[in-house]
Every structure is written in structure tokens, then in C-alpha cells.
Amino acid sequence: MISNDWVQIAIYIIALVAITPLLGSFMARVFEGEHHLLSTPLGWLERGVYRASGIDAKEEMGWKTYAWTLLAFNVLGFLTVFLLQIFQAYLPLNPQQMPNVSWHLAFNTATSFMTNTNWQSYGGESTMSYLTQMLGLAVQNFVSAATGIAVMLAITRGIMRRSTNSIGNFWVDLTRSTIYVLLPLSIILALALVSQGVVQTFSSYVEAHTLEGAKQVIALGPAASQIAIKQLGTNGGGFFNVNSAHPFENPTPISNWLEMFSILMIPAALTYTYGLMVKSRRQGWVLFIAMLLLWLGGLAFSLYGEYATNPVFGTSAMMEGKETRFGVVNSILWSVSTTAASNGSVNAMHSSLSPIAGGVAMFNIMLGEIIFGGVGAGLYGMLTFVLMTVFLAGLMVGRTPEYLGKKIEKYEIAMIIVAILLPSICILVGSGIACILPAGLSSLASKGPHGLSEILYAFSSAAQNNGSAFAGLNANTVFYNVLLGLCMWVGRFAVIFPILAVAGSLAAKKYAPPSEGTFETDNWIFLVLLLAVILIVGALTHLPALSLGPVIEHFLMLRGVTF
């Protein structure tokens, strides 16, 4: 690594720390219904949405109503995207005459974008019409991200409120997240990307002639608008098949930095929002520091893996599969950020990462996407580990566990265990099924431990709603489209429902004033305990599988063994 590489990493971290309180305080004012910067210019739009939809913004919901309303809205989104694909050949804004999508691919894609996974078993420029991309996929990029924020707000209110059955109004949370946060930021980022050369057009594809006289079709489309929200909403999913390695999605070093930074911007800022909403900035900063330390650890291991000498080729920092325009460091910075944030976008092929770097990317996903994580989803995922840490600490000292004045009891821990275990079960069981059935093995591009990593990564990405891939697995088959799609449903709603149940349970409890024996959760002792619980749970659950994939591949590589 050269000095310029260290400077790029330092700028990225400094910018992330700086934006957190600025954007976080703005979002706190938005979500608490206070007057803010956009109240006047966009307030009419919020009120118009309520009037047109018949929503009473002052009406509160219990957790069950909140959960079923959320589910119904997301199922409607799934059906919309599914039907757009099934009938896209007969719909407008299809200048390339894209055919209808197969039922199993349509199921997988509709599920993927509805669950904020954005796993892609298809090539965007060769499969989806402009209408499907905009009305289906881009719209889901907004509302799936807003759904994650809504759940985060619900659990936050559950912690804050006392002796009540209400945790907010899903429609209000969804509307405010979209109108005041996601939409304005997306417009700003889309304009910035267009200024860098990212395409935004309804024109048909262009046929060009190469110097050798061959014909080449150059794909175009309304890409910038979708790329902006796919990054800001931690959605991922490329307008073009090779994602942000495509020069029309990511043409310059500036566009590369903007897209990479926008992955973590909102998830990081939401920690500060949380601190303000629970009336303790220190609580928010503890969560931010925990996420940052995990992110830095993953970055350090990944950089070591890439810059250590590869004995097979006798060199280091290999460029195969990397972003050759911006260098290895930018590829690694992107891979660590996108897998830490359940984003799924890539600017390099993760299958080409060193075994250590590929293992880090996989482990980031397996932890539950809590290292900043998805927009909203990362924070409520981290709060499950916070509550578990408080519970374990209480058991160790023989005292009823409490968090911010709320007792953590059997019901909350049972729901948290469900939220943690079910996605992990999908990863391990799904990978096991794929490893023994011909339908699963026939899609592999590699043998040996790397082949296992391709399968393991795919199910991790689906069950934890990340969306990135090792890119060596042909997932566009009935087997993978259906099985991975089912894992996405479980990974999204088998976490959201228990979280909302915990929110409802905590909201109904009385406030327990702190005493001399209260375990403080805003200091370095708690931070260390929290990190230990996260790593122990992750290691115990997934280390055996990882040891058969990237770990053994690393040791075999050191001996010069390839497959």
C-alpha cells in the first residue's frame, strides 16, 4: 500500500464520523415530528399523502397492527414487481423489447427487492425493461429501505415509552422516511452522479462498431436515479450486470467515492438519531463505535489478505477481478462496506478476493448485517445483541437485567433468539441441501473449498438480505431462485416480527429508575462486552462452515494447492 491508499481510507472514516451527528440530528427531528429544514418545502407532500391515502397521522398502532400492516404493504410490493416482470413484454418503456421474465426468476427478483436484499440472478441490461427497473425495482428500493427505518423507529419507541400499547404509526414512519430522508438525498446524489457521467436516459441501446469492424450494443437507461437510491437505501443491485464496475454506473474516482460513502452514510447517522430519541447521545455513540470497530477489523484483515504474498503466483495485491481503474484498496474498501451494510453492490468480483478477504465479506454478512447494516435494519439488528448482552451481564451479577429503565425478561430474550437463529438456520441448512443435490452442485464454477464458499456466500447473502454474490455461482435456476427467495423471506420477516414483538413488550412495561446496581450501557466496559457477545455468537454459529470454505482454502493456498 502507498500513502495515497492510507489517505483515501482516512478521508472515508473522517467523513463518516463527521456526517453522523449532522444527518443523525436532522433525522431525529424528522421522525419525532418536529420542525426541520424540509418541513416547509416538502410538508405539503406529506400531508397530501395522508389525505390521498386516508391516513390519520395521529393514530397510533400496537405492535401486532404495526407488523401486519407492514407485511401487507410489502406483500403488495412483491406482487407488483412480480407482475411487472411477468407481463413486461406487453408494457410500455421497453425499447429493447425485453421478453417476459420466467416465473421463478420473477419470484426471486420480486422477493429480493421487496426484502431490501437486491440479489440478482439476472443481467439488468439484458433482462429488465426501463419500466420494470423504474416502477418496480427503483420504487422498492425506496419503500424497502423506509420499511427498515420504520422497524428501527418502532423498537426505539418501545424502549422509550412507558406503560403503553402503541409503538407509532407505520404509514407515518414510511412516509416521513421516504419524503424527508431518502427522496431528497437520492435527488442530490443522482444529480452528482450524472455530473460524473452516469447515464440517465430513456433512449434505446446504441449499436457501435469496433475498430475490428464488429458490432457492439451499448446498453443505456435511467441508471443514475436508481443507483442513487440503491446505495443510500443499502439496497444494492446494479442497473447493469457488472454493477458498479460498469463505467456507466461508476465512471470516475469521484463517483466511486460518492457511491461507496453513501452505502454507510444513513446507517451510521441512525445511531446518532437513536441516541437523541432515547435522550442519551452516549448510547448512540457506543453503538456507532462498536460498528466502526467491527468494520475496521474486517478492513484490516481484508487488506492483509490481499497484500500478503500469494505463494501460488509469487506476488501480492493481485488485480484479477478487482476494480482496475481505482486500485485494490478501493475494491477492498467497497467489499467490506457493502457486506457490512447489507448493501450488495460491488465494484469488484468477490470470488476473486483472497480467501481471507472473501471470508471477511462472508462473516460480515453472517453476523446479521449489524456492522452499520441495512438502513434501519442494521440498528435494530444491533439492538438485539445489545439486549442479549444486557441479559447475560445481568445473569453474571445475579440481577434482573435492565436497559434504559426497561427490564429484559424471558419473552424478550426468546424473541431475540428467534431473530438471530432463523436466518442462520437458513444459511446452514440451505447450503447443506445445495451441497448434496445435483441441482445445487451443477451451478458451481469452482471445485473444492472455493466451490463451497460460492454456495455458502449465496445463502448467507440471501438469508441476511445482503444481495452481493461470489459471482461464480449460476443462480438463475429453478432450484436457486426458489430456495434463495424463500431464505430472503425468512431473513427479512422472521427478524422484523420478533423485533416488533419486543418493541410492543418493552413499551408496555413500567420505567425502572436506575440504582447503584444498574449496569451502565454507555461506557467502554459495555462496549467490550457487546463486541465479545457479537463475535462469540457469530463464531459459534458459523465458524465450522467457514473453516471448510475460506479458512481451509487459505491454508491450501499457502501450500500452493489450487482447484
Image (spheres, rainbow, N blue to C red):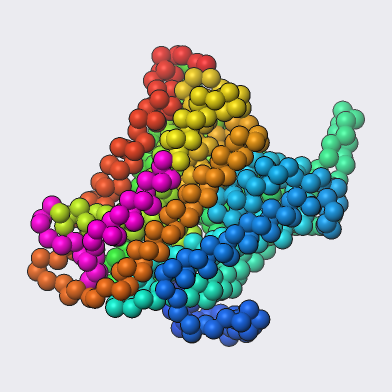
User: How far from the left and from the top, in percent, is residue 268?
Assistant: 43, 60
The quadrant the N terminus occupies is: top left
Chain part drawn in magenta? 396-425
The answer to which quarter of the image holds residue 42 is: bottom right
User: How far from the left and from the top, in percent, is residue 497?
Assistant: 43, 59
| Residue 450 versus residue 63 in the image, above or below | above
**Left or right of 341 in this view: 324:** right
Front position in the image: 383 or 169: 169
**Magenta-drawn stretch, dominant element (helix, strand or loop):** helix
Q: Is residue 292 something one can see in this rendering?
A: no
| Residue 467 versus residue 382 in the image, above or below | above
User: How far from the left and from the top, in percent, is residue 329?
Assistant: 50, 40
> Which residue is farthest top?
560
Residue placed at 58% from the left, 65% from the top? 73
Front position in the image: 425 or 225: 425
User: How far from the left and from the top, in percent, is residue 111?
Assistant: 60, 51
Q: Is residue 233 something one can see in this rendering?
A: yes
Residue placed at 28% from the left, 56% from the top? 413
Front position in the image: 163 or 215: 163
Residue placed at 48% from the left, 35% from the top? 430
The answer to which quarter of the image holds residue 360 is: top left
Residue placed at 30% from the left, 43% from the top? 537
**Left or right of 194 in this view: 428:** left
**Magenta stretch: residue 16 in it?**
no
**Left or right of 290 in this view: 338:** right
